[in-house]
Amino acid sequence: MIHMLLAIMYFQYAARNWEHAGQQSGLNDISNRHYHYALSFLPQLMASHTLQDVQALTMIALHMRSFPKPGPCWMLSTTTLNLAIELGLHRSAKRWASTAPRKSTLEIEMRKRTFWSLFLMHVMTCGKLGRPIPLREEDFDVELPEPVDDDLLSEDGIDTSKPRKCGFLVAMESFRILPAILDLYRSIYSIKRSPQNYIDNVKRLEKRFREWREQWPHEMKATDATKDEEGRVHAQYLTMASLEFRLLLRHPSLSLTSCAEFNEENLTVCMEVSRQMLQHVRVIQKYKSLDTNWQSGALYVLAISTTLFGHWKRAEQVTPSSLASLRRDMDDWLSIMGDVSELLGRSPLTVAVVARSLIPYRLRQASARGCACDSRQDLVYARTASRCKGGFFGSFFSGFII
């Protein structure tokens, strides 16, 4: 576990110092040495079946989550979750048989933290890949971890003589919304969806979402999290998670109703959510805290394509000012996607695949509305797109934008 901790730490250092190629290469090499050494124990970890083995495998899967391709994370997290279920990590300690060996408070808390961290990662990976999720909401009853820092936990219990504090509130709130995410994928994204229940399911999930938002601690609200930079970044990411939930819930491509009013409401919500998402990603970019995985890139491209689709759908409402605002937003998104490409170890030219879908739209709408178009800027975009051969975003996200 120590080697995986160091591997993750050095990898993040390298990813966020891509301006210095020599330093980045050295940090990546150190990270890979620790990672490959930890991988050499993979057969033993899978065979031993202890809590510590599941913790170590979870850390390896967490590191794999940062890779440009999702396959390794999905495969290892699937195997690790099966081991966790075999060890009963998904069950509440209150439901253990009276004859079962007693476990300390520390071990019970470690079991909770390991299960929720592993399950959250696995659910998000399965959801993005469109693959079935192995557990339903009614299949586990383990409680959420206690929101206390490690130094207050011991074999004897929680130290109540010191003020209780928690440095992972963002994780706690992510765990709380996880059952609703399971419900979202089961009812909105399942293969056998029910058109008759679609609107009721959306309203029910919206209610769960509002209840979750209302109970956020003030430290996790983006408008209140001003104490330190780390807290502000955590608040931005939690807000992004809430926006992602609404975007996935309301996306027009998943509508099963013929009600024009409800479909129009879906589009309005998604366009507003995409706009808010850009504002928060700008802040995250400012702090150089963009996530280093393909999942975030996929979400950003979904927001971009939704924004473009919304403007295309409402072409009759396009004005010169709205077109200019759209162009500024797309420029900001392209800047963000360029940084994401760098974090994934790819050329920034790969973001031009987004521009290839943007340019025809902008030129079409500009000519249709008689809006002034900056032909010189469009030429720069077009030349960049013609030089781009696809790359990572070109192949992986083509379904979103082409």
Image: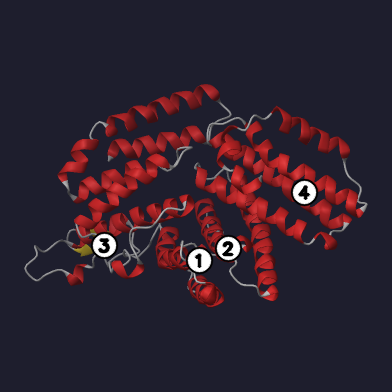
- Judge whether residue 2 can be spotted in this image: yes
Which is nearer the eye, 254 or 48?
254
Label 2 sits on residue = 254
First-in-chain label (3 vs 4): 3
Label 1: which secondary element:
loop
Question: Percent from the top left, x then y, of residue 302?
Answer: 61, 52
Label 3 sits on residue = 90
Query: Residue 188 has which mark?
Result: 1
Amino acid type shown at disc 2? Leu
- Judge whether residue 210 can be spotted in this image: no
Amino acid type shown at disc 4? Arg
**Circle 3 Cα neighbour tier, 10 Å, few/some/many (<14 / 14–19 / ≥20):** many
Proximity of marks 2 and 1: CB atoms separated by less than 8 Å: yes
Amino acid type shown at disc 3? His
Which is nearer the eye, 402 or 325?
402
Question: Percent from the top left, x then y, of residue 39?
Answer: 28, 33
First-in-chain label (2 vs 1): 1
